[in-house]
């Protein structure tokens, strides 16, 4: 059973690496990580792109969108997910 871990991004640069490390540390590995950058004014997008390049062992979906709020970012992520179960993980 595949999980989609949904992570909306907005001003989370200082936490995103620890957040992603936490997901990768899970023993259950049938998941994808769907990240939606909701036009964050910090450098969270740059950090995520470097993290993805350095950790290719997981499946990632990274989306950048015009600011749409937390609900809009979650909805975008869900619409791009392929998991049978959605796990919300706010950064």
Image (cartoon, rainbow, N blue to C red):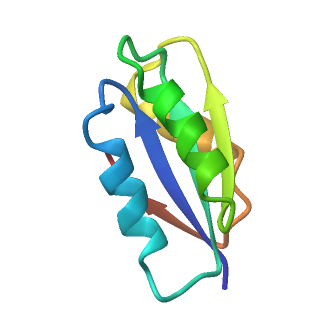
**In the shown orientation, is residue 11 left or right of residue 88?**
left
The answer to which of 10 and 47 lies nearer the viewer is: 47
Location of residue 64 with respect to 59 vertically, above or below: above
**In the shown orientation, is residue 10 left or right of residue 38?**
left
Q: Residue at 65% of width from left, 38% of height from top?
A: 62
Q: Residue at 51% of width from left, 27% of height from top?
A: 45
**Quarter of the image where the N terminus is located:** bottom right
Q: Residue at 48% of width from left, 13% of height from top?
A: 67
The answer to which of 11 and 55 lies nearer the viewer is: 55
Total label count? 0
Q: Residue 37, how many percent across, how many down?
A: 51, 27
**In the shown orientation, is residue 15 left or right of residue 52?**
left
Q: Residue 24, how many percent across, how many down?
A: 48, 70
Q: Residue 43, how many percent across, how many down?
A: 41, 20
Location of residue 86 with respect to 62 vertically, above or below: below
The answer to which of 26 and 72 lies nearer the viewer is: 26
Location of residue 71 with respect to 82 vertically, above or below: above
Q: Residue at 33% of width from left, 47% of height from top?
A: 90
Location of residue 29 with respect to 51 vertically, above or below: below
**Quarter of the image where the C terminus is located:** top left
From this viewpoint, which residue is outermost toward the left?
A: 14
Residue 22 visible in the picture: yes
């Amino acid at each position: 059973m595949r999980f989609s871990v949904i992570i909306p991004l907005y001003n989370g640069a200082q936490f995103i690496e620890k957040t992603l490390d936490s997901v990768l540390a899970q023993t259950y590995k049938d998941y994808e990580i769907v990240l939606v950058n909701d036009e964050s004014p910090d450098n969270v997008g740059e950090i995520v792109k470097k993290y993805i390049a350095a950790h290719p062992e997981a499946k990632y979906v990274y989306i950048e969108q015009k600011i749409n709020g937390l609900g809009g970012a979650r909805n975008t992520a869900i619409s791009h997910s392929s998991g049978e179960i959605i796990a919300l993980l706010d950064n």
